Amino acid sequence: MSRPALPDDTELRDRVRGLDLDSKIRLLTGADLWRLPAEPRLGLSAVTMSDGPQGVRGTGDNPDETGLLAPAPSALAAAWDTGLAERLGELFATEARRKSVDVVLAPVVNLQRTPVAGRHFEYFSEDPLLTGTLAAAVVRGLQSRGVGACLKHFVANDSETDRTQYRSRLDERTLREVYLAPFEQVLAEAEPWSVMAAYSGLDDGTESAPMTENARLLREVLKGEFAFSGPVVSDWAATRSTVASAVGGLDLVMPGPDGPWGDALAAAVRAGEVDEQLVDDKVLRLLRLARHVGRLDEPEPAPVPAQPAEEEFRLLREVAARGTVLLRNHEDLLPLTPEGIRSVALIGPNAVAPYLQGGGSAYVPAVRTVSFEEGLRAALPEDVLLTVHRGGDARLRLPYASATLLTDPDTGETGVRADHLDAGGTRIGGEARATGDWTTYDGFDAQTHRVLLRTVLTLTEPGTHRLEFGCPGRFSVTVDGEEILAGDDGRGVELVLESSHNHPPLRGIDIEVGPQGRRLALALDLTVVDAGGYGRFVTAQLRHAPPGPTPYEEIAEAAAAAQAADVAVVVVGTNEEVESEGWDRTGLDLPGHQNDLVRKVIAANARTIVVVNAGAPVLLPWADEAPALLWAWLPGQEAGHALADVLLGRIEPSGRLPWTLPARAEDVPVPDAVPRDGVVDYSEGVHVGHRAWDKGGLLPAFPFGHGLGWTRWTYESVALSPTPVSAAVLSPAGGGDGLKLAVELTNTGPRAGREVVQVYLEPPHDGLDRPVRLLAGFATVQAAPGARLTAEVRVPARAFQIWDSEARTWRTPPGRYRLHVGRSSRDARLAAEVTVDEGRLHPAG
């Protein structure tokens, strides 16, 4: 249900003028980590924000709070379905209200410029149009139910390495046609109520500034040209200046209550360095946001059910299944028919420990999780034998030490003792926990200066045991009274921003244990980290691995199980060590010995289905050998049910790749985004993703847009609709101009199915540096076996345009344009041509 039209701003402006300067400025910095200040004199209640985009994280007020864990945005993008994306946005709104959240910090519309980007899984696609179209749908769904979206990270923030420091260097045309494009599209089509400025900055050759201070982009482009009327919010702890950020276009510093504004900004206004009208405009923008989300002169929003409903679980299951991409299906191995299957071997490190969501600030403790084993067991007939085999561990980090090995030295009970010490070393509090995971430990008294963790580790199994300790900041680790590790990093918020607080570097030792066993007294002395708005905390991880089989022994055992089974399902992929906010990947290989595992299982069983559980591309050197190959993404909490639905044919895996899957690392057009001398150089220009693969004539493992599904499609004809076409192609995107294609196709296969009809535009070969072809439109349709239908695909005027940096406007080069219609960027089935002449489109003669 859409909200009524908003009233005129006149009354809001009058309210703002009624406040004194200090009261207005107080509203421009967060009240705490997630909340904005309230102001009773304005009728303003506190607006609460929360992380996304794989769900709604919540505010952390209740440490035991859980939530719905959706598939990652790249999985949603793989469905290429705006209706599905809008439904998921509506679900996020319900979940936000369940957690008393008003604004969700999502969607992320940065592009997957390089496959090794740490937050690749959080982004929709490598393509600007696909990203913008699906993000707009999520925003519409979210805001249709009164919860605000925060579009992020504005702009060209596509790397995690030195993410708070680097500058992105790109020319104006690349910025406009590629990286600003999804922001512009979402703003035009969905009108998000807030936008987040990135940590990084922009270097356009003439000026280099952090995004929080970039007046040209924030004030001139975003607020001026794009007519954005809401607040620009800083990324958390991104604001480092007072005057420059205030005049640069930033409206809200997060988190609070501290920061570079407050009294310093008030003094700058009184000194004439910042115009008070700018302050008034910032407050007005915040009031607009509050009005949108019902926090201005409005009663509490209507309550929603406290617990998720079964239909919400079903939607998450549907998104995961429909986003699954069937990359290969030799001899129609899939879908499986349970008849005749007596045994299934479920194999792989990710079969045992599925990777459901990427690491970082958006982490959602799930209300429930369905493993691949649980999903298959529930779906298969009871008489089918299901065995599970890891086939080697793919993680470099050891598991957390089992609670059964840990003893509180004070009580003799299971666990680790935490003593809270003041600056003089006096104990002022403490507690015990039955875990080796103290990431992140906080909530202690304000006088706590150090936390001393003590436990006795009892090892009984003879052989070599491995211990690992992870502690950022200042710390020391002792074993039986002897210091074995120490650190002296005195940083605060920087540890949070680089994710050292939840992914600390590990240091390990080997412990030899004889037949009599061994007891070790462990002590971890941790100095409290003061991270400003992020709070005060310590972090410690105690990890342990007993003696055990080698990876090669586990692979041999898995291959033997595959040989004995009727069907083998191998689940390989990444994990939380590989894909996360805070760092970029160093390569594209599957971690551990997973390639060896897959090849051994394929050799053992001709009916092997390989499932890739990863958000970002990984190299699959055995892809052509796999009888069936599925890409299952980071599928969220319903992972097991969704995979079972796909394998058994209950839901068609109708996904299409939203990015290009490389065959070789050396072919990747942008192999990394590591800053050089503080700069990430976008030297590839407008040739991002599949455009770069086409320009270089490179052969990927699977192209952008590829996906098979359960049926076959015949493309019959394409026609311009209406014909002839007349359009003012110089109008902005979203203005309704452009053209439509009517594509007739028939489901010629044996099953009902969905098809994603993709249209790629090939510009004239006129010497201009333009993509070989670019995605210009798409439509998702479905049909029964034998049914014929017409898919209508809109091609916006912007697809024909380029940015003229000298004239600072869009223009449409004249000439003949070819439209390729098909199933992927490399699989064209039909073509049509149009001619652009004097700003008008004509069918080519």
Image (tube, rainbow, N blue to C red):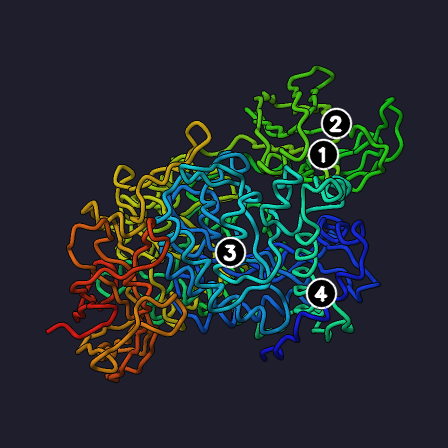
Amino acid at dot 1: Val
Residue type highlighted by circle 3: Leu
| Badge 4: residue crowd in 10 Å (few <14, some 14–19, many ≥20) | some
In the rendering, at what x and y percent does residue 636 appear? 52, 58
Do labels 4 and 1 touch, CB within 8 Å? no
Q: How would you rate the neighbour count of disc 2 (Cα within 10 Å): few for under 14, some for 14-19, many for 20 or more? A: many
Q: Position of residue 317 (x, y in %)?
A: 50, 67
Q: Quadrant of the N terminus?
A: bottom right
Between 755 and 767, the one nearer to me in the picture: 767
1 and 2 marks in contact (CB < 8 Å): yes
**For the residues carrying marks 2 and 4, which lies nearer the camera in this image?**
4
Work out how far the residue at label 3 is from the one at label 1, CA to CA, in angstroms.
Answer: 39 Å
| Residue located beneath label 2 in the image | 527
Label 3 crowding class (10 Å Cα cut-off): few <14, some 14-19, many 20+? many
Kind of residue at disc 2: Thr
Taking the spot 39% from the left edge, 55% from the top edge, the residue there is 125
CB-based contact (under 8 Å), mark 4 and mark 3:
no
Dividing the picture into quadrants, the one containing residue 291 is bottom right
* Badge number at residue 25: none
Q: Say if 549 sits above or below 76 in the image.
A: above
Q: Residue furthest front?
A: 272
Who comes first in sequence, dot 3 or dot 1? 3
Expressed as whole percent of the image width and height from the top left, the position of residue 18 reads: 80, 61
| Count of marks overlaid on the render | 4
Disc 1: which residue: 538
Secondary structure under the numbered disc 1 in the rendered image: strand
Q: Which mark is residue 222?
A: 3
What label sits on residue 13 in the rendered view?
A: 4
Distance between the alpha carbons at the discs numbered 1 and 2: 7 Å
